[in-house]
Amino acid sequence: MKAILTTKNIRKFFGGLSALNDVSLEVNKGLLTMIIGPNGSGKTTLINVISGTLKPDYGKIYFERTDITGWEPHRINKIGIARTFQIARPFAKLTVLENLLIAAGEHIGERVTVALSRGKWIKYEEELVERAFTILSFLDLDHLWNRPANELSGGQLKLLEVGRILMNRPKLILMDEPIAGVNPKLAHEIFQYLTEIKKKFSTTLLIVEHRLDIALDYSDYVFAMHRGRVIAKGDPSEVTSHPKVIESYLGV
């Protein structure tokens, strides 16, 4: 299986604290890969380093064999890596549809050279709206298209965040606790959507999640971290039964 993302010996320090200590992993294309571990194990720090929010102090990051180490977040996003955060950050007063459209990145109608050619930019804007409604329909949010984002429930906001990301056709989606604060029924529904996204949108997912009782059922591959290191990797059932992983959660 082909790796879409590779990290090699990533280290990150905060003062005298080693948050990441020689983290090496490969994320295979087309899978839903999970990063698990107790609080403080370095999971979110790793996502922040991969997405460019933080710069590694040592090591390399490769995306589709291109060295992206130290790149700025906007540049990383442009090549196909998108991310969500624990707390959804929509434009609260804009409608659901407007949130997706504004997330689409460049609008060619804003270019001076294109703005004068009405036929070009109108067709492009129509295609954006069509893409947005396709995504909203997939996420079962199409009936809310004209509602302000601040009227959505917590779970709907999580799905809206996913929809905003899908507007740019990402190759890899990084997610930090997508079901945090969501009731179990909706949490399962969110992961069902994520599983379908792999297939329908031909993307790869790398997810940090604490609620293992739900998330592991949908995982293809798992990395377990503890104290800034990867301590186990492989099939979900094998990783969760690994002695080091059990010890890390028990605090032994």
Image (tube, grey):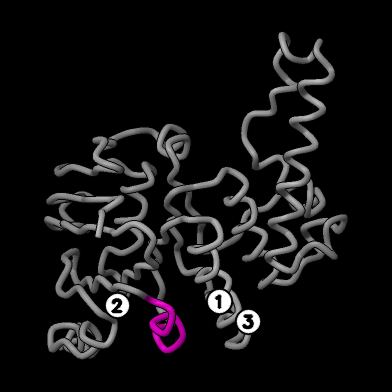
Question: 34 or 56, which is in the foreground?
Answer: 34
Q: Is residue 217 left or right of residue 116?
A: left
Q: Is residue 56 left or right of residue 211?
A: left
Q: Which mark is residue 246?
A: none
**What's under tag 3, amino acid-wise?**
Leu
- Sequence-first disc among 2 and 1: 2
Question: 8 or 85, which is in the foreground?
Answer: 8
Report if the CB atoms under discs 3 and 1 are less than 8 Å apart.
no
Element class at badge 2:
loop
Of helix, strand and loop, which mostly describes the magenta segment?
A: helix
Residue 28: x and y, percent? 29, 59
Do we see residue 13 in this rendering? no
**What's under tag 1, amino acid-wise?**
Gln
Mark 3 neighbour class, 10 Å CA radius: few under 14, some 14 to 19, many 20 or more: some
Q: Is residue 11 left or right of residue 48?
A: left
Indicate yes or no whether the magenta region holds residue 214: yes
Residue 84: x and y, percent? 51, 56
- Sequence-first disc among 2 and 3: 2
**What's under tag 2, amino acid-wise?**
Pro
Q: Which mark is residue 186?
A: 3
Residue 166: x and y, percent? 59, 51
Q: Which residues are magenta?
A: 212-219
Q: Quadrant of the N terminus?
A: bottom left
Q: From mark 2 to mark 3, how far is it between C-alphas?
A: 23 Å
Which circle, 2 or 3, is nearer the viewer? Answer: 3
Residue tagged 1: 192
Q: Quadrant of the C terminus?
A: bottom left
- Sequence-first disc among 3 and 1: 3
Which circle, 2 or 1, is nearer the viewer? Answer: 1
- Depicted 183 relative to depicted 125: above or below: below
Who's the residue at 32% across and 69% down the image?
35
